[in-house]
Amino acid sequence: MIWLILVIPAAIIAVAIYFERRNKRQAQEDHLSVKDHQTLEQDYISHGSGNEATKPENL
């Protein structure tokens, strides 16, 4: 019975560590360089929703 008291907190700690590491890895993969960020901004400016709303055929 004592082993159950020790296993439950260990499992909770293991799951917390797993999700913390997984989130850090995703944050590193999602990081964009300055050039990529500028490219995305230019793409949004030219094709974004604000640009589409001012076209006469969409009014």
Image (cartoon, rainbow, N blue to C red):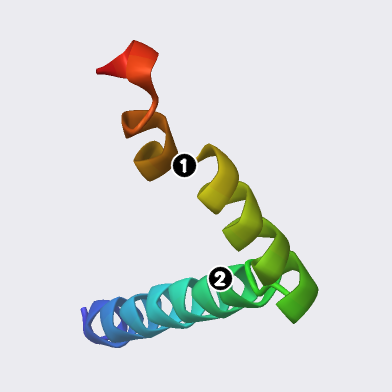
Residue 36 image-quadrant placement = bottom right
Residue pictured at 35% horizontal, 19% vertical: 56
Residue type marked 2? Arg
Few, some or many residues within 10 Å of mark 1 (<14, 14–19, 20+):
few
Which residue corresponds to mark 1?
Answer: 48
Relative to 15, 36 lies left or right: right
Residue 27 image-quadrant placement = bottom right
The image shows residue 49, relative to residue 40, as above or below, that is above
Of labels 2 and 1, the one closer to you: 1
Which residue corresponds to mark 2?
Answer: 22
Residue extending farthest top: 57
Residue pictured at 63% horizontal, 57% vertical: 42
Few, some or many residues within 10 Å of mark 2 (<14, 14–19, 20+):
few
Relative to 18, 36 lies left or right: right
Return the x and y of residue 53 as percentages of the image width and height.
32, 31
Q: In the picture, which quadrant includes the C terminus? A: top left
Give the label on residue 37, or none: none
Residue type marked 1? Gly
The image shows residue 1, relative to residue 41, as above or below, that is below
Give 26 or 17, whichever is nearer the viewer. 26
Q: Helix, strand or loop at disc 1?
A: loop
Determine whether label 2 and label 1 are within 8 Å by CB.
Answer: no
Q: Helix, strand or loop at disc 2?
A: helix
